[in-house]
Amino acid sequence: MNIATLLHMQPEVMLACFIIILLFADLTIRQPNHRILQLITIGLLLVHLATNLTLSEETLFGGMYHSSPMSSAVKSILTIGTLLVVLQAGPWIRLSDNNHKAGEFYILVFTTLLGMFFMTSAGHFLMFYVGLEMASIPMACLIAFDKYRAGSAEAGMKFILSAMFSSALMLFGISLLYGTVGTLYFSDMPEHIVGSPLQMGALVFFFAGLGFKLSLVPFHAWTPDTYQGAPTTVGGYLSVVSKGAAAFALVNILLRVFGPMAENWELLLSVVIVLTITVGNLMALHQQNMKRFMAYSSISQAGYILLAILAGATGTAALTYYILAYMAANLAVFCVINEIEQHTGGHVDRDDYRALYTTNPRLTLVLTLALFSLAGIPPFAGFFSKFFVFAAAAREGHWIVTFLALINTVISLYYYLLVVRAMYIDPSDNPAPTFRTGRLGQLTLVVCLIAIVALGLVSPIYETLCQAAMLTFGAN
Amino acid sequence: MEYTLYILLLPLLSFLILALTGMKWTHRAAGLFATGLLAVAALLSWTAVADYLALAPDATGVRPELLPFCFEWLPFGHGLGINLGLLIDAPSVLMLGVISTVSLMVHIYSLGYMKGERGFQRYYAFLGLFSFAMMGLVVAPGVFQMYLFWELVGVSSYLLIGFYYTRPAAIAASKKAFIVTRFADLGFLIGILIYGYYLGTFDFRPDPAALAAGGMMLPWALGLMFVGGAGKSAMLPLHIWLPDAMEGPTPVSALIHAATMVVAGVYQVARLFPLFVTYAPEVLHAIAWVGALTALYAAIVACVQTDIKRVLAFSTISQIGFMMVALGVCTSTDPHTGGLGYMASLFHLTTHALFKALLFLGAGSVIHAVHSNEMSAMGRLAGRMPLTHITFLIACLAIAGIPPFSGFFSKDEILTACFRYSPTIGWTMTGIAALTAFYMFRLYCRIFWGKASQETEHAHESPAVMTLPLLILAALTCVMGWVPFGTFISADGTPYEIHLDMQVALTSIAFAVVAIALALTFYLNGHSTVPTRIEKACPKLHQAAYRRFYFDEMWQFVTHRIIFGCLSTPIAWFDRHVIDRFMDFMAWSANAAGEELQPLQNGRVQTYMILFLGGIVALTIILLLAAEGMF
């Protein structure tokens, strides 16, 4: 063990340093410093993105930490997602309630990100658990960030209670597992996994813990309340970055640890996928509040993410690609919701979006394309990502689940188009006023838009992911 | 030769910029911008031709195929994938030269012809899109890229035919063109899928091992692909869209519906020629008969049309028939024996592109002057429009096959190839060539000589920006025949010395001269009563030919009576009453279920936790039961 080995966990080390840098910056730069801190954060994330690319397989601390080409790719994706969230945070953090604690916001974001990095790179259940908690406790602070607003505080409360509950159950599952195999190292486990009833219990309890993070039905109930109450920016962060990390951690552990029980968890996943997509879609049909609506949309999208996980090693590339496409579209939607909310004094109902086309045509177009992508309309990224997921699941022989998921895309198309209809067709006496999006907000939207259009058409992106998946899991 | 990529990208750039920001440009700026970009692309194309010809051939005289840019765009697994890229070889580089030349001429010409039209910028944007698509089609390294761009040219053709979208006839014509060619392209797509499935690749040069294994399906694949080619190239009975496509602006007709897009079918067969001739000779010969029949039919119809653009459209159909025949009569890839037709076909494609574009642009110049397409509105224009007149005459002589103009040389090679294959086809084609000479000179006389009409009194020569392209194309038509075409392109790549078959050449010249003489006596002074007497003598035949032998009515009957009436009506009923009702039920039940689920979300964390725990228990039970084999 020397200092050089630490370099193998360079993404985490760097992030830890960034947190300290931000702390000092926050302390030394005179208030109000929200603008400069945002720029510093963006700069740090860009540096991180530029330096984070390792293509080697490394194991540190006797197996506690494990990095692979795939985890490196996932970390880059999470960093990009965080970057987009930070870019769009401007109009909200500028509010007088918040601008003095902008530093806290960025530090908390970095802390959760660090937790997610550890989650995705863990090689040991304790390490994994620490990462998970590191990602969820600061998240509760983020959700309750608007602490003078009752909704935000309530959302934070609900989140932390649910998180604790699910953590406890998950720990119970892990202890069951430890009881049957006598180790917590991922690499030592598969030879002892035989699929005994106790291990099945362990699997379900463990799965529930991550199911909470991914907001899968029936572990999803906190999601709508939390999204609705949380600041919109945090909602965006919660819906893509946090979910992406949990999804990758799940696939990693299912393949590395529960590999011998594939038959069991495939059934488990199949049931949960059908429930998640269907319930998420059905509940989304009747939502008026856009943030709540996006919460249900993100539940049903999590079902598709899980479908890629169901395809196992074959689906990892599709999974990563799906998360990337989902991230671009979903963050664009949240960015638009946030802009409208901040510029109209907190309007987030679908009725407030009526005839938005007449006042803010460009913003409307961005939102429309993002919703098209979420619904999976070609030629946008969402279509290709769904296509790859379905193809991977079908190749593994999960016909029924794939078919049910396909049917559900029709329902989702309906409610996504409801929003589009409101913006373009429905008349309104007082549509939202015309406003200008800030420069960084515009940048976010442009980046998202380019990603939505280009991801599907530029094939090398998917091929790169396929190669990373092949290097990591030995499959394509 | 990496710069060849820019030949494609420049027109695309012109399209993107003009389509997105065109309304903010003045007409003049937009036109000059597009023309400028295309001029650069044309320069690059000519450089590419020169560079390619400068390449050192190997010992047998074959030049290499280059792949300056290629990547796998969409992998399907099992080694099958769609490659996008540029394949530079003799036919593709030739086509690049032809397309960019004609396109540049049309760009320049349109500056005058379209002056002041509403949607001028849109027009140039579409021209850019078409040029990009057509060049992408010819440089395709595989059949799938060809298909992608094939559809793209279809779309741009649709957009340009319907350019005057306020005219119902233009809209109907654009829809007709799109639907008919799209219908034919279904065959192309199925052919491609068979090709890919059995050969494991979409490239034009499949693996010999794969060919040995999957070769037996190749005739089907190639035959179906030809259906698509026949649609685009207006072969019988899918030709019905081309005459109507003349509703588009005349320069567009010159570019798309005479010189480039409509020969895509010929180019397609030429591209797949080695496969056709080795694995599907019977399909190839069927193509020859289709081509001959089409050429004959179109030539007869052209003799009685009175709309000058319609005459030219049928003449185009007939000439494409010639090219198809030339390909179809090949029996080997050796240009000295059975493979002469390949070279002849591409030679004729090139010369035809130039002189037919010239004819259309000339016709456009005339229409510009008299504001009508009808022959009755013309006459005695030779003196008023000297440049148009002389260039039009040159093109007529070329298409009639009079030496030393280009059409003579290429048509002579086609006839030689036909006679080598079968005297029947040879004599038929010679006869059609004579008909061609007749109807072209009928057209020529009725425009420039004959009786003057009211409209012709105010006619005057077109501006220089329109006559310049005419002069350039006329010059090219004069010299193109002397190019030693065979040394550059032949079926197997080896150089071939073109030598005139005197017997064939003299016969065809004699036929053509007689036909021209007939046309001149009938129509030159406009007083001859012979044409009307012939018309009176066999009115039914004349009427049938004038109505294009009722092909449109036949299709109308098939689509409306049989398909719409007998098939679609019951299906529509089933759709409306069974499928729609079922869908309504689904939507209603989803909606109702959504309502019912709402109470679960009551905002209390304790309820959520019960749900959570209940979920875990239920899932565990399911897993345990499944492990016990209960499901």
Image (spheres, rainbow, N blue to C red):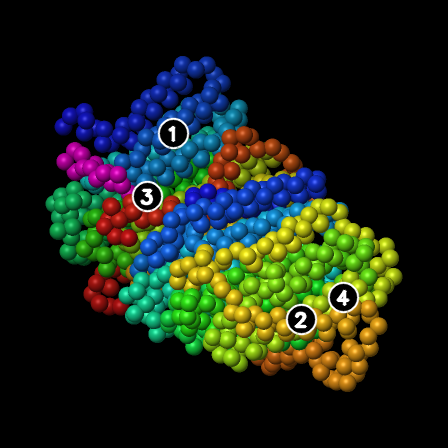
Measure how far apart labels 4 and 2 are at the Cα level: 15 Å
Q: Amino acid at mark 3?
A: Ala
Going by the image, does B54 lie left or right of B581?
Answer: left
Q: Residues within 10 Å of mark 2 (few under 14, many from 20)?
A: some
Whether B527 is drawn above or below B102: the answer is below
Q: Do the residues marked 3 and 2 share a common chain?
A: no
Q: Which residues are magenta?
A: A55-70
Image quadrant assignment for residue B373:
bottom right
Seen at 78% across and 77% down, the residue is B531
Q: Chain of mark 3?
A: A
> Which residue occupies the foreground of this view, B311 or B433?
B433
> Which residue occupies the foreground of this view, B76 or A248?
B76
Measure how far apart labels 3 and 2 are at the Cα level: 84 Å
Does the magenta run of residues contain B179? no
* Residue B445: image tag: 4
**Are circles 1 and 3 on residues that touch, CB within 8 Å?**
no
Seen at 63% across and 62% down, the residue is B398
| Front of the two marks 4 and 2 | 2
Q: Secondary structure at mark 1?
A: helix
Q: Amino acid at mark 1?
A: Leu
Q: Is residue B7 visible?
A: no
Q: Which residue is mark 1?
A: A45
Q: Amino acid at mark 2?
A: Val
Seen at 51% across and 47% down, the residue is B45
Q: Which residue is mark 2?
A: B513
Whether A118 is drawn above or below A175: the answer is above
Q: What is the x, y in percent for residue B560?
A: 64, 77
Q: Residues within 10 Å of mark 1 (few under 14, many from 20)?
A: many
